[in-house]
Image (cartoon, rainbow, N blue to C red):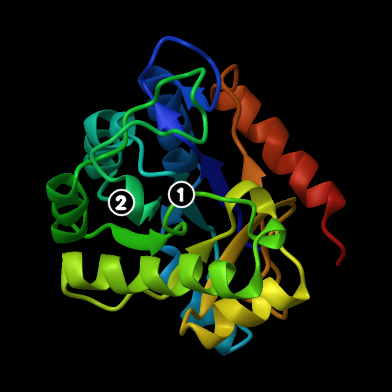
Amino acid sequence: MVPILMYHNVGERERHLNVSPQALARQCRLLSAMGFHAITLRELAEYLQAHHLPQRAAVFTFDDALLGVYEHALPILRNCGWSATVFAVSGRLGQEADWAPRHRHRVMSREQIAELHAQGWEVGAHTLTHPYLTRLSPEDARREITQCREDLQQLIGAEVLSFCYPYGDLDEQVVQMVQQAGYRVACTVRKGLVRPHDNPLALPRVPIAYSDGATGLLYRLWRAWKRTPR
């Protein structure tokens, strides 16, 4: 089984959707000491297609493409020789994350997204404006899903194959739209570890909280292992 680690921002003082750079560095050192290596979500999708998962692999995912990820997570993972997957809200690049207005998170610019891609990170899609997709009309939901992919592909000059459902909000119709838009893999906020025969368009993750250091990460991995059917 493979853990997909779910992060949001890194480095800002307030705690909502945030971890400190020190905590992230400790977690990376722990995983490395345990023999883990990091792969991107796109790479995991290739393993899932073959119904075979790599040993001691973990996927780092960062929702929303917030600025602290570029400033802090990029150099921390680079020190380990690792890459990650960042999910970008294409209609809000270079702006504030208006879906979390109380916290005033900044979103990466187009140039920073392109640089992440150039440094080996995977750029995935997180819709145009970060809505609850099941609350939209089918036409609007489809536009949020497809236009984001087109925008990001034009920006980075590469195919975008990974998607993340904002707020973990999905139903059968939304999943079908994601598949029809050309994505091969998608993340939810459901807790658990990925198994070889899981639906690649509805994968579980392991959420990482502000207070989690190395010990907290171990606990969350254990909890995810306990709740994942075998």
Q: Residue 124: x percent and y percent? A: 39, 62
Residue 108 is left or right of residue 218, and the answer is: left
| Quadrant of the snapshot with the N terminus | bottom right
Residue on which the image places disc 1:
60
| Residue 128, quarter of the rendered image | bottom left
Disc 2 marks which residue? 82
Secondary structure under the numbered disc 1 in the rendered image: strand
The C terminus appears in which quarter of the rendering? bottom right
Binning the other alpha carbons within 10 Å of mark 1 as few (below 14), some (14 to 19) or many (20 upward) gives many
Identity of the residue drawn at 25% across and 72% down:
153
Please give the name of the residue rendered at 42% of the width and 36% of the height, measured from the top-left corner.
Answer: 28
Residue 14 at what x, y percent from top left?
48, 11
Say if residue 85 shows up in the picture. Answer: no
**Location of residue 177 in the rendering, given as x and y in whole percent from the top left corner:** 60, 79
Q: At numbered mark 2, what does the secondary structure look like: helix, strand or loop?
A: loop
Which residue is rendered at x = 48% and y = 34% of the image? 30
